[in-house]
Image: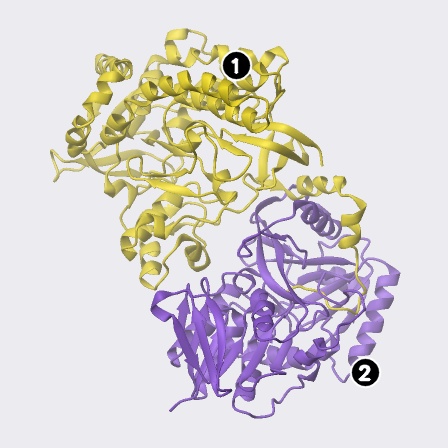
Chain colours: A purple, B yellow
Amino acid sequence: MKPRALVVGGGLHGACAAMHLASSGFDVTVIEKQYAGRHASGVNAGGVRRLGRHPAEIPLAVAALERWQRLEALIGDNGGFHACGQIKVAENVDEMTALEARAAQVRELGFDHEILLSRAELRRRVPAIASHCVGALACDGDGAADPYRTLTAWRRRSQRKGARWLEGVRVTNIETIRSEGWRLWTDHSDFRCLEGDWLINCAGGWAGELSQWLGERVELEPRALMMTITERISPFLVPVIGAAGRALSFKQRENGTVMIGGGLFGSIDTDGESSKVNFRRLAKNIESALALFPFMRETKIIRNWTGIEGVTIDGLPVLGNSARYDRLIHSFGYSAHGFQLSAITGEIVRDLACEREPKLPITPFAIQRFDTPRSTARAGHAT
Amino acid sequence: MRTIPLAIIGAGPAGMAAAATAARYGLKPVLFDEQPAPGGQIYRALESTPLRRPELLGEDYWHGKSLVQALRDGAIDYRPGHTVWQLNRDGEVGLLAGDRAELIRAERIVLATGAQERPFPIPGWTLPGVMGAGAAQVLLKTSGVAAQAPLVLAGSGPLLYLVAAQYSRAGAAVAAILETTPRENFRHAAGHIGGAVKGWRYLRKGLSLLKELKRAGIRHEHQVTELHAEGNGRLQHVRWRTAARPDVWQQCDATTLLLHHGVVPNVQMTRALGGEHDWSEAQLCWCPRRDSLGRSDIEGFFIAGDGGGIGGAKSAALQGELAALAALASLDLLDDVALHRETAPRHRALASELAIRPFLDALYRPGDRWRRPADEVIVCRCEEVSAGEVRRVAKLGCSGPNQMKSFTRCGMGPCQGRLCGLTVSEILAEETGQSIEQTGYYRLRPPFKPITLGQMASAADGTDYGQRQQQGSTAVVTEKASS
């Protein structure tokens, strides 16, 4: 009999895990309480970025980009990925010095994907940038993709490989079956009880709650990322722009609209299932965008929205085996920068479920790191 | 953030009446309105219209005069030119006046945001020269400018006749009225004749309008079953077929085509607030849930007027008064005895005002073919998504309008789904076999009205120090989100 995997969470990481597990002979069921990509997976800003990654994430991000480059061959659709590059702008000499230090650090780790841009080179690549900007750090193979399209492609391919997707089904309780497997209880009358050999926690903003049920300590909060999209304007920008000293992600999409994000958080409604924009914070985010692209003052905002994401206290994901149970794998807490990594994390989950050593280093993402509460202040996570 | 006790949004009959009622009890309400002058759509430009001959716009129009005058006596803090672009359950109101955006808080909020025209998708409705009859009426009221003749009006409902009459009185050449009311509506409406008799004044008005149009010699086609707007780059002619002559395409030249299938509540704000909405099968629209005093299911929010269900200007004013009384009571400015004393006569008056509604709703109910158009018809004008595309995606397993957005971008343009929301929900419900309640509606995203980046940034000035700290710059080498 095929080993049965229950994947909780129909987001990007769940879909990618489902695809790889189903391809490797697992009988996969994905359980999603709303619909695939309802939260951060469906509505994030779509950055495909190695630039500025935490050192522990760099090997994964590099491997993930290689998957992005052949996504079409992998899952039948390229997810709208285009390698337009990513650029992080320095607005003063201090910021430039910090970027130089960063570039040196990455080189020392043995990677060469981050390169420094002079003021002139920055202006050549981004003619619309404000004149005070002094230089930048860039990653040429990086780019952007369409989150919902990507998610749909992973989901479809997983279904073709036999994965079953249950949407609108919420897990309400988890039991172990004689440490041999798992029994999930749900709120749906057709699927009251689901059993499996493996449990994969890809529950994003709700993964902390799930871990808590299982008695696994993790410091994760659901946060609502805010996004802005403008009306269509004439093409003026190719790469995705970030800023060394600001919380900002800025890009013009192919249809001419400009997407402004930057890991700023709105607020989550009391029901926990929806979230809203905090306009005071958003206004600061827009100020940041205008500081870099002052010509956009008259451009109209068409829509603001939020998507819920699980953010860990150290800003690093939880990816690896459970500390307490056999046949429980975690893949969550990507802390607002998991879109790019979603192209690789499913392979790691599959390796773990096949009881193979993953080819990439995942020790820094072990859930055990939360065993001893930290006294340090919240640091390093996405801002 | 500045906090005010009572904010009223919208200065149509409901909002003006709510403001006057609150002021009568010594509370100075703040009345925000997008327009430069009070009156809403129905009493639009009442103080300034260049069409001073009372008979031109009709006596009903001038009814609004006393409501408008009440705004001018200082007891009401009336803020014209204030667009509400954001609203949340905590009572936070995002305002835009000129180039300044501002966030304030209100303890109680009366939403009097009125109605909008029902989407009326036909082949060619996106051509320049095709517009809503309501929009054309606004043009006439505000600037005295008639839409370009020759003019064709198509659809059904009292407003269609009224606009035709107003344009005709203003001297515009009305080439034809193409009435889409299906024959069976007359039979269904007959079942509600009792209410119509109670509302005989409305009936008489309707009949006299029809008589006036006939006297003016305007061509009036009945039971139109198909309608196309056509032209090269802009509207040049209108083609149609009728039930009487189903094999014959008839045609007439037109520079302007005014479409009208009645009005539906403008639910942008109540939707964005996440309140419950019920589908009205009688009016074929979503109505935010409210009780007889206009209290919504969101604490502190009241709904008055056509924004809660279509009842017309007079019932809107009564509902505005009721909502204000409920708001006053919730602020302990009115005790239960006084509340009952004040509301009872208004409830009676409202019941009598609304008596004719079931008759009108049945008579002017747009036929299925107009609400769920053929595959080639554009449904979402902003993103150019056709009815066929919506049906195709529904077959792929898309069950709701929000997923539809992700599949097709339908409803994601600048109009925020105002012009396609009803159509998409109805088509999806039909395709999936779900009820329209199960199908649902778009999750509405702020801003309700487009606001520029510069204007939005101006709202940051009020930020306090704590918030600045919270999202100040971070060290360069640490992780930064951009995915």
Residue B436 sits above or below residue A199 on the image: above
**Whole-percent x, y for residue B422 in the image:** 37, 43
Q: Are marks 1 and 2 on the same chain?
A: no
Residue A318 sits above or below residue A41 on the image: below
Task: Please tell me which residue lies in front, B124 or A95.
Answer: A95
Lateral position of residue B162 relative to residue B25, left or right: left
The residue drawn where x is 31% and y is 29% is B254
**Whole-percent x, y for residue B217 in the image:** 22, 15
Lateral position of residue B319 relative to residue A350, left or right: left
Quarter of the image that includes the N terminus of chain A:
bottom left
Task: Please tell me which residue lies in front, B56 or B470.
Answer: B470
Q: Chain of mark 1?
A: B
- Helix, strand, or loop for circle 1? helix
Q: Chain of mark 2?
A: A
Residue that carries the numbered disc 1 in the rendered image: B68
Lateral position of residue A364 relative to residue A229, left or right: right
Lateral position of residue B75 relative to residue B379, left or right: right
The residue drawn where x is 75% and y is 72% is A373
Task: Please tell me which residue lies in front, B337 or A290.
Answer: B337
In terms of image quadrants, where is residue B403? bottom left
Which class describes the residues within 10 Å of circle 1: few (<14), some (14-19), or many (20+)? many
**What is the CA distance from the residue labelled 1 to the residue labelled 2?**
73 Å
The residue drawn where x is 63% and y is 33% is B106
**Whole-percent x, y for residue A147 in the image:** 53, 65
The answer to whether residue B17 of the structure is visible from this angle is: no
Residue that carries the numbered disc 2 in the rendered image: A108
Task: Please tell me which residue lies in front, B3 or A346.
Answer: B3
Callout 2 amino acid: Glu
Question: Foreground mark, 1 or 2?
Answer: 1
Would you say the residues marked 1 and 2 are in contact, meaning their CB atoms lie under 8 Å apart? no
